Amino acid sequence: MARALAALAGREFDVLVVGGGITGAVTAWDAAQRGLSVALLERGDFGGATSAESLKVVHGGVRYLQHLDVVRVRESSRERRALLRMAPHLVHPMPFVVPTYGHGMRGPEILAAAFILLNALTADRNRGLTDPSRRVPAAGIVGRARGQLELDLGHRFRLGSDSWLLVDGSLAESPAWATDPRTIGVSKSHATLPFEGDDLDRYLRLPLGYRSSIFAPQTRSVAPVHAWALRLWDWETKDLFHGLVRVEVSPANGVPATADLISRRLLAERVPISTPDPRWDRLLYGIHSVEQYLRARAGALA
Ligand SMILES: Cc1cc2nc3c(=O)[nH]c(=O)nc-3n(C[C@H](O)[C@H](O)[C@H](O)COP(=O)(O)OP(=O)(O)OC[C@H]3O[C@@H](n4cnc5c(N)ncnc54)[C@H](O)[C@@H]3O)c2cc1C
């Protein structure tokens, strides 16, 4: 790092900022934007302390809820909205699942109440965000009933038919699906990426209608599957995950000929759906119908 202490000592500044982490950098940037002359003093390296450890999550204020710090919840939600609008290449909605334990402070009842409060406090979290894929959905409880309903429905279908079964999500969650040669999983999430370096670059920059090579995903799966990525919609001018799904099949189907056939069928099923789902670009027509059905049934079971 170049040090210019003599230059600092030789002139007078309007503002002196001590500390070159994110707080200092933004303070210096803001002051300079206002036409002030600014000096930034850092004893180590810029961004080398706490800011280097950040998980880079724009959390929107959920962490302040535990102290009922309503002002900071609102402020963080507002900032997240501004960043989603101003920096579409850097800030993307990212789903999180938080496990619950027992029935006390860490139980589902308290979390459900906290989510009601959070959703009310951040009701304007998407104001001005017109792109559905950039809107932040309301927080909610994922019930076991819903997951079980999906599995039961799939198993019942297989008992009565040997047609192709399309699952919205990972096949690796169910050993029965992961070994079924006529079941396909279409996953919208890319929480773990299967390649590194140039291979990852090629994977993420797949052109419209192309698929990646076949790989075996390393996840917390209960059963091994084969997978590939498929680009359903053009991502140029959007983000790299736009229109990108991960297709999973049983290892018996993990050969290029089947992958090509299945990919062609999935591409034929993709339709622009006018729905508020933030990930519409990764939905297939069939999945959308099943999703509506399951939401209605799961609602009735709750
Ligand atoms: C593990 C972890 C994960 C996190 N994840 C997130 C996240 O996902 N999202 C989020 O919003 N926040 C996150 N945070 C919080 C966030 O990283 C911090 O709030 C933020 O980085 C603090 O920035 P800062 O500039 O105030 O401090 P720092 O980054 O620590 O910067 C302070 C700087 O001041 C310098 N300095 C100190 N004393 C002097 C001195 N006398 N003279 C000159 N220089 C000096 C230090 O060398 C340092 O570079 C996380 C924090 C941690 C620890």
Image (cartoon, rainbow, N blue to C red):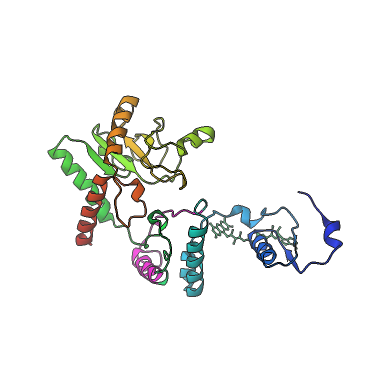
Check the image and report above or below for 46 versus 248: below
Residue ranking furthest to the left: 160
User: Where is residue 97 drawn, in percent x and y?
Assistant: 39, 55
Q: Nearer the viewer, residue 156 or 76?
A: 76
Is residue 194 at least partly visible in the picture?
no
Does the magenta segment cover residue 148? no
Looking at the rendering, the quadrant in which ligand 1 lies is bottom right
**Residue 10 figure quarter:** bottom right
Q: Is residue 107 left or right of residue 144?
A: right
First to last magenta residue range = 91-120
Write the residue at 29% across / 36% down.
Answer: 178
Can I make out residue 276 in this image? yes
Q: Give the residue at x 47% y 66%.
A: 77
| Residue at 42%, 56% in the rendered image | 134
Name the residue: 44% across, 36% down: 206
Give whichever of 256, 103 is nearer the camera. Answer: 256
131 w.r.t. 193: above or below: below
- Left or right of 291, for residue 240: right
Please state if 299 lies on the left or on the right of 128 as rendered: left
In the image, residue 95 lies in the stretch drawn in magenta? yes
Check the picture and name the quadrant holding the C terminus.
Answer: bottom left
Relative to 81, residue 238 above or below: above
Residue 173: x %, y % from top left: 31, 43
Query: From the viewer's perspective, is residue 152 above or below residue 115?
Result: above
